[in-house]
Amino acid sequence: MDKQILKILERDARTSPAQMAVMLGKTEEEIEKSIKQMEEAGIIRHYKAIIDWEKAGKEQVFAFIDVRVSPSRGVGFDDVARRVYKYPEVHSVYLVSGDYDLRVVVEGKTMRDVAFFVAEKLSTLEGVLSTKSSFLLKKYKMDGDIFEEPAAEEDRLAVAP
């Protein structure tokens, strides 16, 4: 039942325990107890909305920064990753396989802000060997949510009988 609750919350965190009880054939109290246990265990970390900031009129730029790192003895890549994720400009940090070690998602108001962050803060960290930046041009889907508007009726191809 817990995984079913998690799937429902992942799709819409505003689904009430009463609604989930009906959906899963359980009591509201059972649902509330499961949610509380998962919150206390850190399985449910927090609740948040997926916001289309572009529609909300917020100017922002995202960049994916691939970082090659010299791992530290005993902590590997974790030490550099911890220093990187403490910057408020950093949206996400992932340890990845391939030519680079970390993939850092950086948010700025302008491309210049992101470039400044990479040049002045990220690339100067001890253990950072090199970086490669790619800017996000358009967001189609994020966290399972499609951001693209559906095609208008007139965009469809006419089918002749």
Image: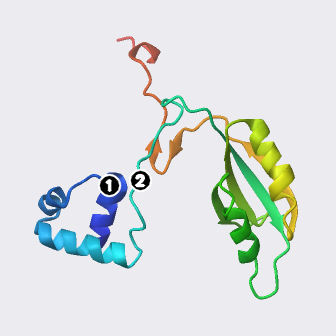
Residue 65 lies, with reference to residue 38, above or below; the image says above
Find disc 2 in the rendering and name its residue.
Answer: 48
Residue 143, percent from left and from top:
48, 51
Left/right placement of residue 60 relative to residue 7 reads right
Judging from the image, the colouring scheme is rainbow
Read off the residue under disc 1. Answer: 13
- Dots 1, 2 in contact, CB < 8 A: yes
Furthest residue toward bottom: 74
Q: Which mark is residue 24?
A: none
The reply, left or right, for residue 108 in relation to residue 98 is: left
Q: What secondary structure is found at the residue carrying circle 1?
A: loop
Residue pictured at 21% horizontal, 75% vertical: 33
Which amino acid type is shown beneath numbered disc 2?
Lys
Rendering coords of residue 139 (x, y %): 57, 38
Q: Indicate the position of residue 8 as horizontal and vertical percent values.
A: 29, 58
Q: Amino acid at mark 1?
A: Ala
Q: Residues within 10 Å of mark 1 (few under 14, many from 20)?
A: some
Q: Can residue 99 be seen by looking at this rendering? A: no
Percent position of residue 74, x then y: 77, 88
